[in-house]
Image (spheres, rainbow, N blue to C red):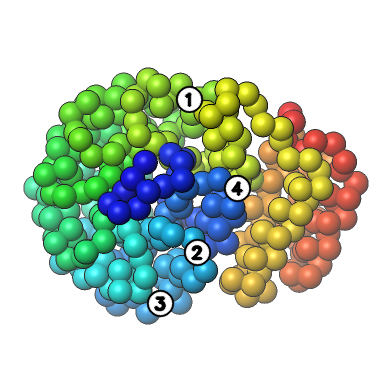
């Protein structure tokens, strides 16, 4: 798959996820087979540009190419300015968020709430595309609710505006992350546009990845929640798509090494105080993915720890007592 001048190594992408796809997690997923990883959404408001949290979200030092930043906002000029600023800081692809279903986002008419105003969608996309020389992509949902599914008209607007790739999460904003994914809508979008289409929604296994690609005709798939606690999912899907067989799950030594390196990277990136607290959700995803009661029980003690060194030590102790193939369940 190609986005603008960037030929991707495969057609597997890591979805932008608020509070999750920071630099350490993006680098981890890239190392295990994701061809590209989008940042968590970054506000386009100019007064937040130098905010410490915003700077961390947009940080890309050491990240493999192509580096993609996702922007959130409602004002065409602010989004255009933010795109220009981030491109100057090294972003090689700008993604526009019109898919987030969170109430705090939609309540200010951003994210998937923008799908209710097609004229504004066109104005935003035209402004951003005109503002930068790097490729601009778009992430949407199928519509606001089941009575207002307009992914096809949004897709045509995107194509006419110069968008160079379109990601469709196959649910409406009202559906959130529940209910069946409308893969049929993604298939219809793919039929009417010539730009690359990326399918997103409930892709959590190699079999589902192949089914979605074959059914929708999409150029690529985007994985979000399926990668939480399982960054190896990308290499497993790539292996299955290429060879038709399953790649072995990571053995306990690799499982432990990956977790410990990831948690240490989070501590380094955020600092001890914030890093320790952000690491807790990742540890939970890793341990719960094993379905092992011993590791899940250990989370209670790990989540009470307030020192980063002790957090690492306690994780290692828990994993040293667990020698099974961690993700075989």
Name the residue that disc number 4 marks.
32
Q: Earlier in the sequence, mark 2 or mark 3?
A: 3
Q: Badge 4 local density, few (<14 within 10 Å), some, or many (20+)? A: some
Q: Residues within 10 Å of mark 2 (few under 14, many from 20)?
A: some
Which residue is more in the foreground, 210 or 314? Answer: 210
Q: Is residue 83 left or right of residue 247?
A: left
Answer above or below: position of 87 versus 129: below
Look at the numbered disc 2 and give the secondary structure of its residue. loop
Vertical comparison of 252 with 77: above or below: above
* Residue matched to label 1: 210
Circle 2 sits on which residue? 63
The residue wearing badge 3 is: 51
Nearest the eye: 215 or 279: 215
Give the CA separation, mark 2 to mark 4: 14 Å
Does the residue at mark 3 contact the one at mark 1 (Cβ under 8 Å)? no
Q: Quadrant of residue 290?
A: top right
SS at circle 4: loop
Q: For the N terminus, which image quadrant?
A: top left
Estimate the x, y position of residue 23 in percent, counting from the top left: 52, 63
What is the x, y in percent for residue 199?
Answer: 37, 34
Of the numbered discs in the image, which one, if any, rests on residue 154? none
Contact flag, marks 2 and 4 (Cβ < 8 Å): no
């Amino acid at each position: 798959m190609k986005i603008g001048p960037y030929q991707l190594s495969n057609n597997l992408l890591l979805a932008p996820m608020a509070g999750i796809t920071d630099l350490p997690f993006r680098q981890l997923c890239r190392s295990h087979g994701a061809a590209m990883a989008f940042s968590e959404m970054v506000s386009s408001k100019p007064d937040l540009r130098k905010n410490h949290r915003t700077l961390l979200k947009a940080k890309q030092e050491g990240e493999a190419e192509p580096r993609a930043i996702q922007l959130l906002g409602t004002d065409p000029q602010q989004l255009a300015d933010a795109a220009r600023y981030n491109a100057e800081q090294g972003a090689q692809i700008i993604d526009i968020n019109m898919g987030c279903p969170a109430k705090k986002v939609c309540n200010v008419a951003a994210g998937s709430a923008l799908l209710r105003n097609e004229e504004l969608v066109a104005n935003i996309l035209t402004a951003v595309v005109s503002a930068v020389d790097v490729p601009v992509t778009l992430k949407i949902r199928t519509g606001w609710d089941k009575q207002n599914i307009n992914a096809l008209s949004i897709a045509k607007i995107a194509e006419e505006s110069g968008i160079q790739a379109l990601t469709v999460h196959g649910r409406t904003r009202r559906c959130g992350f529940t209910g069946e994914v409308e893969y049929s809508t993604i298939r219809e979008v793919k039929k009417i546009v010539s730009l690359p289409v990326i399918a997103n929604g409930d892709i959590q296994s190699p079999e589902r990845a192949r089914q979605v690609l074959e059914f929708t005709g999409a150029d690529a798939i985007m994985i979000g929640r399926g990668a939480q606690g399982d960054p190896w999912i990308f290499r497993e899907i790539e292996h299955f798509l290429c060879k038709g067989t399953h790649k072995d799950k990571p053995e306990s030594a690799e499982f432990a090494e990956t977790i410990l390196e990831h948690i240490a990277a989070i501590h380094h990136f955020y600092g001890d105080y914030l890093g320790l607290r952000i690491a807790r959700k990742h540890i939970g995803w890793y341990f719960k993915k094993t379905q092992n009661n011993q590791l899940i029980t250990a989370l209670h003690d790990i989540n009470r720890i307030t020192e980063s060194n002790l957090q690492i030590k306690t994780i290692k102790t828990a994993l040293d007592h667990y020698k099974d193939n961690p993700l075989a369940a």
